[in-house]
Amino acid sequence: MPTCEEERKIVPDGVAPVVPGACDNHSAGVTLLEPSRGIGSGARVVAVCVSRRKGERKKPVPSVALVADHGVQGDAHAGTGHRQVSLLAAESIEKMRQKGLSVSAGDFAENVTTEGILLPNLPVGARIRIGEAVLEVTQIGKECHTRCAIFHQAGDCVMPREGIFARVIRPGTISPGDAIERIPRGRRGEGKGMPFNHFDEGGRAVMVDVGAKEPTRRVAVASATVFMKKETAAAITAGGMKKGDVLGIARIAGIAAAKKTSGLIPLAHPVALTSVSVDVGVDGERGTVVVTSTVKAFDRTGVEMEAMVSASVAALTIYDMCKGADRGISIGDIFLLSKEGGKSGAYRRGGRS
């Protein structure tokens, strides 16, 4: 049977999602919940399904691997967009059976069939855990621009109203029988072992209390790359830019920015820095300028953000100094190279030391 394969529609803010009503009769073992309950203690996965090509029904499989920011591994609908995984409740499928259709898991193009959970009651942004995987709801329902075969047979289709879509926050393998748990707002992005400590119990943003920590030596190194024409890079090396010493001014900007970090990043602590150095390397053959900022302190919290802000602002300064000659300049590859100190120990990009 052809699937519901039409374009999906994000429900705008303020529009209440449609709540599936209970059918008069439903299959044994499937318990419909009252709307106020949302997720019951017995909420679980009934089936997981994949299709290799778009436009065909999805077939149940023993398990699926969820890939972070991608979706179901090997599924035709996986990708980097917001509709990475589709979910539909067994209760919704049962409604269509009550209309005389012979339908089952996967016939509505859903990846995950659930029971014991009112999927459309989950707001956009809600997160659920299935095994080790964490999903974030991105869309409620979808718009059918052309009616599918199911609609033409029954005069109705539940997927546009009661199906939901999500992106994969934390990867994992899921199988039928896995429990489904909603993650409270105060524990928003964590998978197991990954707590976010910038939220209080009510889910409100807070500055972390580091008063009980002992000061330790802190070092962080960050990098940013400025991409430009080869001619622009050559002019920088030769000192031929009209605004003056590009590299010298970029170094000063990076040092100043490190000292201003707590005023730019809302939850960052003011840190008494002991050293800031900014190195700038020009590669004329590639047309790049690589900024490397090293920040040091003896304090209760790390200086990773100071290093990142320093490298970023130095790169922006290079753009400002050169934009008159090269409007196509871009900035990228901004990342932490290494850090030392603190409870988490040392870090090196590409693996822990």
Image: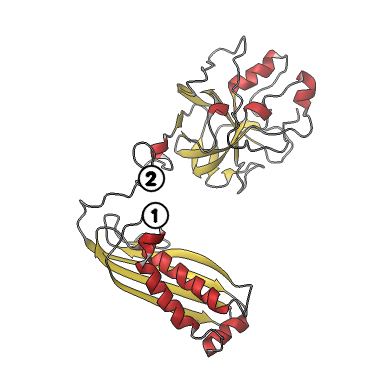
The image quarter containing residue 74 is top right
Horizontal side, residue 333 vs residue 195: left or right: right
Q: Front-most of 307 and 172?
A: 307
Camera-side residue of 332 and 264: 264
For the point 77% across and 34% down, the residue is 145
Find residue 322 and name its label: none
Helix, strand or loop status at disc 1: loop
Name the residue carrying label 2: 205
Q: Name which quarter of the figure residue 100 lies in.
A: top right
Residue at image mark 1: 266
The amino acid on which the numbered mark 1 sits, given as a three-letter code, is Pro
The amino acid sitting under disc 2 is: Ala
Question: Which one is in front, 244 or 288?
Answer: 244
Q: Whole-percent x and y of residue 24? A: 62, 9
In which quadrant of the rendered image does the C terminus lie? Answer: bottom left
Asked if residue 143 is positioned above or below residue 259 in the image, the reply reads above
Q: Residue at x 38, y 73 (%)?
A: 255
Q: Residues within 10 Å of mark 1 (few under 14, many from 20)?
A: few
- Tell me where residue 154 sits by quadrant: top right
Is the C-beta separation of discs 2 and 1 under 8 Å? Answer: yes
Q: Residue at x 76, y 30 (%)?
A: 2
At mark 2, the secondary structure is loop
Classify mark 2: residues with Cα within 10 Å, few (<14), some (14-19) or many (20+): some
Q: Earlier in the sequence, mark 2 or mark 1?
A: 2
Vertical placement of residue 133 versus 39, above or below: below
